[in-house]
Image: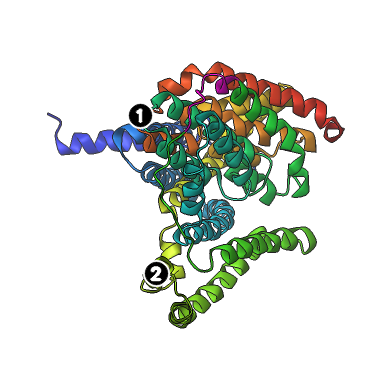
């Protein structure tokens, strides 16, 4: 057994090697640590953290925990070394730069999540689900409806929320038909990811590209046709394996709460604020989103103050017994509380983004992103590099992959930036672990929609991936000039 002095001496020797400056190259305000112990340790910690993230569904460890710790360790090592070399200000400035990028993303997503939670509390999504369940559609028609709705809702809401909503519908109508549920879940994941690729609001990756100023807001819609191809090719093939039996509804009727439609309208106004502020005033989109959150708070105040009088008046002027009971139930409910909706945001996801942005930013500051950029975007054709990004996003979440590309800032035309946006968005559909929508549905349809089930249809999904790339190269050729 080692004695304490010997243990300390070993630790000191390791620290001496790890933080030695003999192998470093300085470029003024930046030190290349890629061939140094700190760089190797940073890569190791990030790899361990991300392995734990990928195993979240197995070990039930929240994905934010490992990346938060990894981010702290990586920047702690950077800060220690730079302070030892009298360059602590440079490390601090780099950290603050990455923190600012995260802050813009954080507040933008927080507002969007708050609006979605408000719509959910007002039973907007439950009403849509009940309507579809009770219409007596065939399973094949529901397969197509949930896919199409996922494709068109995800550009406004995020693809995760859209996928969960559509999955609730197929679980309700599918019953014991596990084959239908599994195929419908695969279709929903592909559709939600494809729909999110042609809108700045549909996916975190598109949002980052827009906020970075690489692609104008309206230019994203050039990806509509390639995204539709990505969704339709697998959907058409899979639909032949869906039976035409009529789905059985349970007769459930869901009434939306007061203000549901107006909240949807306010969300659209908020999006307009964000787009207009960025396009015409040159301000970050988060300014418009936070302004929209303030408007929602005023509306929440209005609902809370007028709830009692509204339902009392409605009860006095209704004679239908069922309607009377419905209004009484709504009137006795808790008042609309906007901060409760803020509290229900996906905090694990928001903190995960912090860890990812800071980890990737730290690796970039060390010098690894420059190496990768040189290897991919200087030695390869940009088209092949961007296609590879999409394949990587099927294995590693597309958020760190896209943030890494944005941090590299390769010199690309608009067509190539649209291509990498498309591939990073839809490439994750090839595996169930490649997107937040896929991971969430594996939990919601546990034991039915699994990694193995999705993997069986990966060649079909890959066919749509390849077709969408060719469609973009042909249909949007003007952006490559």
How far across and how far down the image is residue 439, in percent?
43, 35
363 displayed left or right of 274: left
Q: CA distance from mark 2 to mark 1?
A: 36 Å
**What's the residue at 42%, 54% (across, down)?**
347
**Is 295 above or below relative to 172?**
below
- Give the image quarter of residue 227: top right
Q: Which range of residues does the magenta coloring cover?
A: 237-246
Screen quadrant of the N terminus: top left
Find out whether the residues at labels 2 and 1 contact each other: C-beta distance under 8 Å: no
Q: Nearer the viewer, residue 22 or 61?
A: 61
To which quarter of the image does residue 270 belong?
A: bottom right
Task: Tell me what residue is drawn at x 39 percent, y 44 percent.
Answer: 250
Looking at the picture, how far across and down is residue 426, in whole percent? Answer: 61, 32
Q: Main secondary structure of the magenta part?
A: loop
Q: Position of residue 337 (x, y in %)?
A: 43, 71
Kindly state the secondary structure of the residue where label 2 is placed: helix
Residue pointed to by mark 2: 321
Residue highlighted by disc 1? 176
First in sequence, mark 2 or 1: give its number.
1
At 44% from the left edge and 30% from the top edge, which residue is drawn?
181
Q: Residues within 10 Å of mark 2 (few under 14, many from 20)?
A: few
SS at badge 1: loop
């Amino acid at each position: 057994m080692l004695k304490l002095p010997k243990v300390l001496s070993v630790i000191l020797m390791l620290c001496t090697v790890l933080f030695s400056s003999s192998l470093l190259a300085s470029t003024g305000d930046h030190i290349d640590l890629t061939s140094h112990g700190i760089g190797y340790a940073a890569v190791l910690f990030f790899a361990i953290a991300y392995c734990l993230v990928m195993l979240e569904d197995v070990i039930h460890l929240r994905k934010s925990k490992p990346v938060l710790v990894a981010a702290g360790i990586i920047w702690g090592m950077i800060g220690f070394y730079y302070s030892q070399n009298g360059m602590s200000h440079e490390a601090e400035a780099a950290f603050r730069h990455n923190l600012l990028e995260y802050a813009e993303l954080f507040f933008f997503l927080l507002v969007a999540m708050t609006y979605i939670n408000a719509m959910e509390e007002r039973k907007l999504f439950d009403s849509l689900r009940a309507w579809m369940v009770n219409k007596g559609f065939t399973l094949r028609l529901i397969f197509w409806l949930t896919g199409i709705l996922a494709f068109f809702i995800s550009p406004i809401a995020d693809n995760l929320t859209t996928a969960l909503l559509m999955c609730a519908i197929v679980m309700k109508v599918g019953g014991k038909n596990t084959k239908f549920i599994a195929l419908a879940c695969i279709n929903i994941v592909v559709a939600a990811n494809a729909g999110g690729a042609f809108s700045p609001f549909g996916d975190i990756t598109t949002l980052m590209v827009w906020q970075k100023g690489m692609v104008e807001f309206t230019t994203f819609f050039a990806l509509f046709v390639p995204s539709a191809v990505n969704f339709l090719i697998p959907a058409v093939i899979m639909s032949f394996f869906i039976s035409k039996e009529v789905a059985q509804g349970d007769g459930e009727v869901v009434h939306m709460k007061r203000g549901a439609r107006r909240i949807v309208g306010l969300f659209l106004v908020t999006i307009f604020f964000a787009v207009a502020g960025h396009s015409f005033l040159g301000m970050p989109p988060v300014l418009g989103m936070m302004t929209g959150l303030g408007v929602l708070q005023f509306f929440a105040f209005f609902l809370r103050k007028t709830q009692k009088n509204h339902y009392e008046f409605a009860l006095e002027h209704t004679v239908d017994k069922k309607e009377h009971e419905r209004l009484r139930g709504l009137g006795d409910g808790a008042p609309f509380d906007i901060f409760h909706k803020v509290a229900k945001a996906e905090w694990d996801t928001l903190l995960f983004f912090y860890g990812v942005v800071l980890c990737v930013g730290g690796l970039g500051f060390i010098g690894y992103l420059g190496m990768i950029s040189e290897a991919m975007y200087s030695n390869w054709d940009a088209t092949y590099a961007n296609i590879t990004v999409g394949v990587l996003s099927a294995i590693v979440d597309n958020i760190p992959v896209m943030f890494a590309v944005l941090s590299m800032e390769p010199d690309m035309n608009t067509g190539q930036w649209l291509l990498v946006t498309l591939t990073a968005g839809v490439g994750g559909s090839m595996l169930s672990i490649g997107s937040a929508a896929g991971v969430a549905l594996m939990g919601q349809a546990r034991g039915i929609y699994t990694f193995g089930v999705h993997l069986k249809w990966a060649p079909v999904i890959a066919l749509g991936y390849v077709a969408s790339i060719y469609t973009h190269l042909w249909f949007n050729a003007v952006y490559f000039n």
